[in-house]
Image (cartoon, helix red, strand yellow):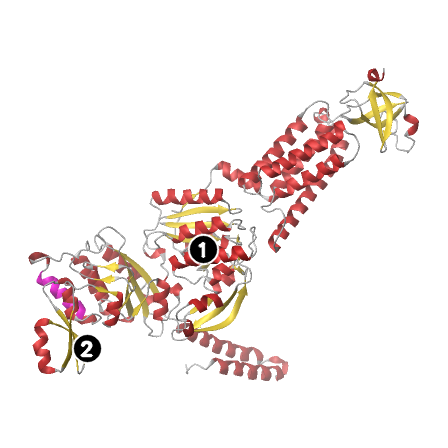
Amino acid sequence: MGPLLPLSGVFALQRILYKRASRALCGLFAPVCFAVVFILMTRVAVAQNADEPSGMYIPIRLPIVGTVDTQVQATILRQFDRLKGRDGRRGILVLGFDSSGENAGGGSDFGRSFELAKFLCDQRMSGIKTVAFISESLTGHGVLVALACEQIVMAPEATFGPANTNTNATGPQIDDAMRAAYKQIANYRKTVPESLALAMIDPKIDVLRVSTDQGEEFIRSDQLEETKRKRVVLGIEEIRPTPVSLSGRRARQFGIVKSLARSLPEVAESLGMPARLLDTDPSLFGDWKPLQVFLKGPIEAQNISIATSHIEKGLRDSANMVILRIDSPGGSTEQSLVFAAWLASFDASRVRTIAYVPREARGDAALIAMACDEMVVHPDAVLGGDGAAFVDERQGDAITAAWREGVAAKRSRSWSLPVAMVRPGLVVKRATKADSGFIDYFSTEELESRADQNAWTMGAEVGTGPIVLSGRRATELAIASHEVEDFEGLKRAYGIGNEVIISEPGWVDVLLNALAAPGVAWLLLLIAGAGLYIEMHTPGIGIGGFVSLVAFVIYFWSQYLNGTSGWLEVMLFLVGLFCLATELFVLPGFGIFGFGGGLLIVVSLVLASQTFVLPSNDYQIRQMQYSLVGLLGAVIGIGLLSVLFRRWLPSMPVLHRILLKSPHDGVDLLVDDHFDELIGLEGVATTRLSPAGKARIAGRLVDVMSDSGLLEPGTAVRVVEIRARRVLVRLMHQEE
């Protein structure tokens, strides 16, 4: 096939073909034209993707003993075809040296280290660019592996060498085989001059840095005279100490280190590749033990504490991959920031943290997700934006400072986009680094604080905080590593089998989650209201009162454990019930106690279903709407059930005792307005007056209300007053 067309040429050709195709009779040429355009544009897309090198990061756990070398070799070979790249382009393999273990560097075995170094210098590796990343210190024979890489990247304060950790070593600890190995690897790669490489292992070798008329070179002290005979020596510097040990800054001055970087994103930036290409794929090593932990519901101290304890227990049980399953609207920025900082403190080469968001991580819950090493999302998941917690300007400043100095510093990541997902008013734009094409996302404040701000070109605006992202958009911005439809998709993405340890809550917590679901919560209120209605129409305290009490207790208990209800809601509910009882039993009539009591009950039920009192953002407004609609649905349901109960329950064979049948006896209820005629007349209660009920007055069945407390059926009463269209009756012997 011919050379690729420029992208602008493809678009121009597309327009020409479209016009010609539209003029063609019956459109016969249109499919062919569009097929040609599609093929050309596909080739352009492939060419653009080919510009991005393939890459991988492999942490080498020091010391190199046992099977560490064979594990690294096997990992590289499994990914060999992918690393070789496309169209002859060389992939980039970054080897990171983890020196956090006990005796990490000095304990490396010479034979194992040499075998791994020879493998890296093998002809098969010619299609892969190898880079050694030294973030802290590299001593002992692990130095030999770094010498076998084509390029070395170091942190400024990191140290490289000595390979001989015993400065007094003589004789058998340093033999000719070791010297020959270091000389062989150094001469093959030429990353580090031979004399320096030998001086890292042999304290007897003195190395000089010599400036000549032909440039700068490193030689042994015994080679100085020969060098003077061949070239004009302009300056001599003796390298100390011996065995040689170099800091990152000094190695950069010597030209051994091409660039300085403190973190993997900075390494990726120096290599001109996206940082995501250097994320460790846990499935490469085959020794990961995944643990799944759930973080569900509003963020508060209780569920953060539970999640923390589950993770700590899993780590004690040898788990080294934490999959944090988040389904939360946020709720407490302080708790989220503390938890995020704790997650960011893990060593990614030892404990890998993955945030899995199947549905939502709104508000400050997004900070927890973005503090993990990687994020896996459902395509339609919601990240950031308005959440259960309201963030004002003062809190936004505090979040910025905490994230910038905490998680962003530990992860060596930019802070603008994560903070903008919570903080209102923060504008984030796409930024491109001119020399490498590296892409990041900055606010004006962050860009101005960078020492290399002039190297970045600001592009299109990503959004203004609080920014809300879908799972698809998060993947496009490289915030999320994978899009999956379900947890099985996550397992496939990381090569995880069925060995996932699920730190699930117990059966009590599972029951709690079910009861706290909005539909179940409102069903509990429906049951409680129906039970209360039955109790009001049943003599004595019966099953209706028991069912109502249990339903109300379960409702408030589940909401309390779910983090949306507290003692305030319970107290408001109890005070509301007290006011209604006062209205019914003590002060008959519909006054302030009845209205106020009903209002308090409604407020308590609504507040028990949400984490805020008054809504302050769009999310909270929607949540309050859901709460009111749910409560209204429960009230309507209670009304419908009461009609059904009155119609069918009294006539059912077994259940007729639950609800008393209305004693009409063929006599119509008094429904006219002539209540004044009843004053002074005597009658008999036909139902329980508690205090409302029915009584037969002068041969007519009348809705009445007792002025003498609870009265049982058959009690003689007298009408004493008509108040607010209610007939008040009093016990006969009290009249006497």
Q: Which residue is mark 2?
A: 216
708 left or right of 175?
Answer: right
- Figure quadrant of the N terminus: bottom left
Which amino acid is tagged 1?
Answer: Ala
Residue at the image point whose x is 47% and y is 49% from the top: 325
For discs 1 and 2, the disc positioned in front in the rendered view: 1
**Viewport quadrant of the C terminus:** top right
Which amino acid, by three-letter code, is at mark 2?
Glu
- Badge 1: how crowded within 10 Å, few (<14), some, or many (20+)? some
Q: In the displayed structure, does residue 430 sit left or right of residue 104?
A: right
Q: What predominant SS class does the magenta segment belong to?
A: helix
| Position of 221 relative to 604 (above/below) | below
Q: Residue furthest left?
A: 171
Q: In terms of depth relative to the viewer, which is nearer, 209 or 325?
A: 209
Q: Which residue is mark 1?
A: 402
In which quadrant of the rendered view does residue 53 lie? bottom left
Residue 336 x/y as whole percent: 48, 50
Q: Position of residue 538 (x, y in %)?
A: 73, 25
User: Relative to 448, is 678 above or below?
Assistant: above
Q: Earlier in the sequence, mark 1 or mark 2?
A: 2
> Where's residue 301, x and y in %?
48, 44
